Image: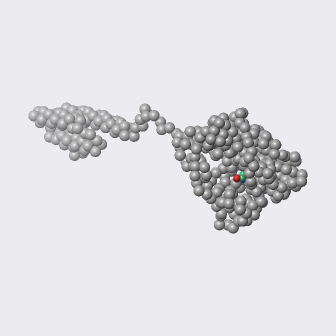
């Protein structure tokens, strides 16, 4: 009887101690230790059960039953604690890897068309409306096409206007203007009439300033047919100026010199900003130079495969950056290719 009471008390003590210990258990490792301490083969409960043998046979069932109850209770508590710990671990893991969905998203910066491309497209549109096709031409040219076919033989003094970058291959260079494209276009179309614009990059070896870049775009224009006169040239360019800069615009043609046109001219447009009165942009003159032009030189026609006795043509060359500068009041051509977003985004 004494033994029985002692053993039941021992079981109660183990139970109370185990439950209290379980509350302290904070992780899986501590839980494993706890299990060994109370439920393991060498644990407290097993040790208690082993002393059952010392009890009289009739007392054993009561204590044994109590011991089994206790084992079940402790196992249930263990399971509950285990579940609790798993839940805590999961919560911690989720918190650590959490995405705060309340934060605003990172905006994707959207690209936009470069101001030069926008200007080129407008130019294509206008000349397309006048029946001109875009004729692509190469940037790496040979001396013959860039110069000689355009009446600029080696050592011709006018070559000084077009100093360029020469490639290591003899006779090859970066084109200084889009005019060599005239030769390619003529050889492509002759003896049919043609009406093309030739847009693209040009290169010049020169001091870079607010008005000069070593790389810039040009849009060449070329029309060849029977009976083309300077009146056609003037009409086409006036139509272009008015569509690009407004229906009020006027043009004036000043005599000029290019070896590949005869006669040659420079076209000025009246300053839209001051209406021709004279201002900062037109430097007080009321006029803005927009392009070079002229009637295709007979020798150039011949070089392209056309008989100058039958055909005549006009040509012009304009700088789209300059057109954009006039249109948008941009005062430095270096801004175009300096990749400064503050500049570029104004035209996005
Ligand atoms: N190629 C000339 C230049 O670069 C422009 C031009 C083109 C002039 C066609 C007349 C005719 O300056």
Indicate whether 328 appears above or below 319.
above
Does the image show residue 125?
no
Residue lying furthest right: 310
Q: Position of residue 131 (x, y in %)?
A: 79, 41
Question: Which quadrant holds residue 290?
Answer: top right
Please indicate whether residue 186 sits to the left or right of residue 140 in the image: right
Question: Which quadrant holds residue 289?
Answer: top right
Please indicate whether residue 219 sits to the left or right of residue 68 in the image: right
Does the image show residue 280?
yes
| Residue ID at (82%, 58%) | 299
Indicate whether 191 appears above or below 107.
below
Please indicate whether residue 323 sits to the left or right of residue 238 in the image: left
The total number of labels drawn is: 0
| Residue ID at (67%, 47%) | 319
Q: Position of residue 194 (x, y in %)?
A: 82, 48
Residue lying furthest left: 2
The colour style of the image is one colour
The quarter of the rendered structure image containing the N terminus is: top left
Q: Position of residue 144 (x, y in %)?
A: 75, 62
Q: Position of residue 67 (x, y in %)?
A: 22, 35
| Residue ID at (24%, 42%) | 34
């Amino acid at each position: 009887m004494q033994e029985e009471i002692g053993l039941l008390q021992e079981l109660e003590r183990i139970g109370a101690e185990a439950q209290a210990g379980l509350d302290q258990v904070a992780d899986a490792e501590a839980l494993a230790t706890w299990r060994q301490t109370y439920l393991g083969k060498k644990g407290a409960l097993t040790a208690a059960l082993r002393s059952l043998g010392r009890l009289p046979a009739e007392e054993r069932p009561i204590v044994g039953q109590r011991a089994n109850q206790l084992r079940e209770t402790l196992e249930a508590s263990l399971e509950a604690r285990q579940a609790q710990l798993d839940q805590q671990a999961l919560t911690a893991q989720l918190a650590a890897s959490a995405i705060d969905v309340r934060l605003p998203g990172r905006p994707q910066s959207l690209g936009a068309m470069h101001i030069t491309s926008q200007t080129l497209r407008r130019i294509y549109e206008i000349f397309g409306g006048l029946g001109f096709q875009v004729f692509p031409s190469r940037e790496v040219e040979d001396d013959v096409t860039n110069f000689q076919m355009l009446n600029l033989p080696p050592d011709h003094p006018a070559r000084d206007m077009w100093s360029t970058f020469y490639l290591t291959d003899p006779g090859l260079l970066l084109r200084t203007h889009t005019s060599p494209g005239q030769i390619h276009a003529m050889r492509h179309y002759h003896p049919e009439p043609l009406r093309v614009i030739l847009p693209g990059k040009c290169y010049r070896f020169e001091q870079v300033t607010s008005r000069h870049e070593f790389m810039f775009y040009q849009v060449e224009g070329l029309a060849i047919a029977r009976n083309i006169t300077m009146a056609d040239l003037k009409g086409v360019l006036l139509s272009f100026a008015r569509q690009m800069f407004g229906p009020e615009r006027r043009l004036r043609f000043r005599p000029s010199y290019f070896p590949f046109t005869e006669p040659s001219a420079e076209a000025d447009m009246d300053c839209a900003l001051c209406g021709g009165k004279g201002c900062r942009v037109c430097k007080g003159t009321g006029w803005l130079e927009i392009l070079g032009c002229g009637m295709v030189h007979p020798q150039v026609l011949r070089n392209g495969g056309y008989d100058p006795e039958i055909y005549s043509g006009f040509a012009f060359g304009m700088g789209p950056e300059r057109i954009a500068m006039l249109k948008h009041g941009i005062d430095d051509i270096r801004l175009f290719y300096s990749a400064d977003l503050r500049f570029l985004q104004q035209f996005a």
